[in-house]
């Protein structure tokens, strides 16, 4: 259990790349593989925690069960929000493609921009402009919203 927690903590450090240039494809591939590995470790960790929660509940140790529930919620969330992944290529307004990797969006010109998720809304900061898109967990491959000028945007995931 301590080993899994250690791996989760080590893997929680994000890859930061502050240049305006696009990440090399080999680096993008490594970032993608890292995210997949972290997701698998998190899933296995939560599955084991669920077993412990059931065990503690059955034996009447509700204090331990509640601690486990809290840890499950922390593992499934960041800052109280559900973890979401936008990783992959997206078609925007049926015209241009954008690539998401981690909390970075790479536009059609190869420039990197940051995005954040809070309260069901994805905000992409593009220079001094922004786009706000609604995230629907039932349909995570379609994002709809507007930019700061009020122009509607529809993102459709075309590959992971």
Image (cartoon, rainbow, N blue to C red):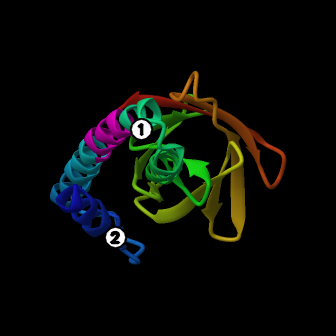
129 displayed left or right of 67 = right
Q: Residue at x 22, y 62 (%)?
A: 2
Q: Residue at x 40, y 59 (%)?
A: 110
Q: Position of residue 78 (x, y in %)?
A: 53, 57
Q: Is residue 47 magenta?
A: yes
Q: Which of the two discs, 2 and 1, sits closer to the camera?
A: 1
Numbered range of the magenta stretch: 42-53
Q: Residue at x 38, y 77 (%)?
A: 19
Whether residue 113 is visible to the viewer of this picture, yes or no, is yes
The single residue placed furthest to the right in the displayed view is: 150
The single residue placed furthest to the bottom in the displayed view is: 18
For label 2, the residue is 13
Residue nearest the viewer, comparing 150 with 42: 42
Q: Position of residue 65 (x, y in %)?
A: 48, 44
In the rendered image, which quarter is residue 27 located in? bottom left
Q: What quarter of the picture does the C terminus occupy?
A: top left
Q: Position of residue 49 (x, y in %)?
A: 35, 42
Residue nearest the viewer, comparing 94 with 5: 5
Question: On screen, 76 above or below 10?
Answer: above
Q: Residue 53 got which mark?
A: 1
Q: Residue at x 17, y 60 (%)?
A: 3
């Amino acid at each position: 259990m301590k080993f899994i927690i250690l791996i989760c903590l080590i893997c929680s450090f994000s890859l930061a790349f502050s240049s305006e240039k696009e990440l090399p494809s080999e680096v993008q591939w490594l970032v993608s593989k890292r995210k997949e590995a972290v997701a698998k470790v998190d899933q296995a960790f939560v599955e084991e925690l669920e077993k412990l929660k059931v065990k503690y509940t059955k034996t009447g140790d509700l204090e331990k069960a509640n601690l486990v529930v809290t840890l499950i919620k922390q593992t499934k969330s960041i800052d109280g929000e559900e973890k979401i992944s936008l990783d992959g290529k997206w078609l925007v307004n049926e015209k241009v493609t954008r690539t998401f990797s981690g909390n970075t969006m790479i536009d059609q010109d190869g420039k990197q921009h940051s995005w954040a998720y809070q309260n069901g809304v994805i905000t992409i900061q593009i220079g001094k402009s922004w786009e706000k898109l609604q995230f629907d967990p039932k349909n995570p491959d379609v994002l709809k919203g507007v930019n700061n000028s009020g122009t509607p945007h529809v993102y459709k995931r075309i590959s992971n």
